[in-house]
Image: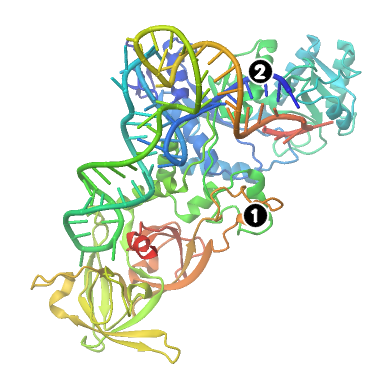
Amino acid sequence: MATNLEKGNVNLDEVIGSPRNFLEEIVEADLKSQKHSGRVLTRFPPEPNGYLHIGHAKSICLNFGLAQKYGGKTNLRFDDTNPTKEDVEYVDSIKEDVRWLGFEWANEFYASDYFEQLYEWAIVLIQKGLAYVDDQSQEEIRLTRGTVNLAGKDSPWRNRTVEENVDFFRRMRAGEFKDGDKVLRAKIDMGHSNMLMRDPILYRIIHTAHHRTGNKWCIYPMYDYAHGQSDSLEQITHSICTLEFDVHRPLYDWFIEKLEIFPSHQYEFARLNMTYTVMSKRKLLQLVQEKIVLGWDDPRMPTICGLRRRGYTPESIRAFADKVGVAKRDNVIDLSLLDFCLREDLNKRAERRMAVLNPLKVVITNYPEGQTEQLEAVNNPEDETAGKRSIPFGREIYIETEDFMENPPKKFFRLAPGQEVRLRYAYFIRCNEVIKDSAGNITELRCTYDPATKGGNSPDGRKVQGTIHWVEKKNGVKAEIRLLDRLFSKENPDDVPEGTDWKEAINKESLKVIEGFVEPSLASAKPLDKFQFERMGYFSVDYDSSPSKLVFNRTTTLKDTWAKIAGQ
RNA sequence: UGUCCUGUGGUGUAAUUGGCAACACGUCUGUCUCUGGAUCAGAAGAGUCUAGGUUCGAUUCCUAGCAGGACAACCA
């Protein structure tokens, strides 16, 4: 069944045939039936009232990805119908985040671009007897709407004449009334089983300047009235949104039918949820406002800018969006899947460096005093083209405190009294003496090295099980290291005991700031540069970092089999 | 006491539309290794919400239940 369709650089014959989810199925069916002459146009419609988070990333990847796959395009449209909540600050951050994720929109639109058209269509509805101006107060409207089990009551103003409605609506626009004095409502059915069809409000009066239209308008359309018509104006073929808008679809279709305009169609998918994470804008805002986190881009936030600062790559987030799939059932994704995607990406791309986070001084007693030498290290064993670098070695070095145990359990392959270990890219050393302070804390280790093992291999073929990382003391660079962990200690932060709220689940250990030493090649690292600190994890340079004070964020740890064994 | 959506391993998504449940993450073995990482090899884990029914055969169809979610802002 060749379709012989070609769109952009996409050969549809090759693409059609293996839909990966129900939306792709729908698109393919529409393509085959030539529903929109084979055209695919999606849109990503954020409200500029907050920062984008990983849940939006799923939607972005879905909307842009779907269009890309089938040779279509995607518009970015800001749903800016409520001037009391929206701001250009958010517009800019949203554009930055979408671009960072790797997508470019065909058109940048605003619902406010359509205010005039929307107004005219409202007049059309009034003239058709399908909308009326209601003088009831907000309270009265709420009370007469009924409940899910109880029909609402008709407004006393429901049967005004067309002329009267047109006149009042014009005067609403002209600014003759105060906020809340009047609204424009659709005339549908106050007894409808779907609450949204009970004469929904189309326009309300808000005497507030809009970030784009200024003071031109004092009436603003509601979401339901603006969104579908905006889709229609742009001739969106597939309007994809989350499940909670499912109940809005009858209204979406009602406007299109009554106005006889381009029939965009809405499809709903299940929004993303993740373990140990809250995703609602309200809660994220609360975290910021109550200074529980440092800001929207706090590296512990699930915001795009937070993930970016933490060190996640766009590639890893796209891979994640791809792996979580698209369906209609509620879901909670393991945070470990995001980490997997990150590691998979960075393992191939991030250069390796050595950094000691929790330093323990080691003196190599048989190494000549005052001498240093340069050793060669591989930048990335997964990628030969990453090349090599040299690192200084000397008589005094730091190793990780956890890499030494005075009384090691069996299977501890690291350093211990009398035990030999390999210093990565350097030498074998053996521990001879443990120095302690008066309190009994280990302050220093005295070791000897075997000069014949330079580079890490022994000419006599003797094996050492363990390899540990290190930083030479004199040339090592001090660095602040921020150990980030999940923001919540409960899988489901909302699942807390009666009488307490989700903030009880906040992980008080989610940020630990320590000072460590990194190898000198890191001194020139720039914000957002990413590295694997060998055996410790992936780290990214923070915005706060400067040549005089390096700051790294731990994006995620490496898998740690030993920690698992030791923990048992 | 309503309407709509959804129920498949621990998690998420599949199953050529009726052909005897697959993939990924996670978990557990083992291999290899100058990262206890990566790699490689393998294993366990669901009989598809329940009960009936149709059929040679049901995750797919029918009926009745049950469970979870959404909806009662002049928010989006």
The residue to which callout 2 is attached is A250
* Relative image position of residue B65 (x, y in whole percent): 61, 22
- Write down the quadrant of residue A264 in the picture: top right
Element carrying mark 2: helix
Q: Nearer the viewer, residue A262 or A52?
A: A52
Relative to B61, residue A195 above or below: below
The chain carrying label 1 is A
Residue at figure coordinates x 86%, y 24% from the top left: A144
Q: What mark, if any, has residue A474 been given in the picture?
A: none
Q: Secondary structure at mark 1?
A: helix
First along the sequence among labels 2 and 1: 2
Mark yes or no: residue A543 visible.
Answer: yes
Q: Is residue A527 above or below residue B6?
A: below
Q: A345 or A506, which is in the foreground?
A: A506
Q: Quadrant of residue A370?
A: bottom left
Q: Amino acid at mark 1?
A: Lys
Confirm whether residue A233 shows in the render.
no
Tell me, yes or no, whether dots 2 and 1 are on the same chain: yes
Residue A395, how many percent across, how many down?
26, 84
Residue sitting at x 70%, y 20%: A117
Q: Is residue A234 above or below residue A439?
A: above
**Is A362 situated left or right of A331 in this image?**
left
Q: Residue at x 60, y 14 (%)?
A: A262
Callout 2: residue from which chain? A
Amino acid at pointer 2: Pro
What residue is shown with label 1?
Answer: A503
Number of labelled discs?
2
Q: Which colour assignment does the render follow? A: rainbow
Classed neighbour count for the residue bearing mark 2: other residues with Cα under 10 Å, few (<14), some (14–19), many (≥20): some
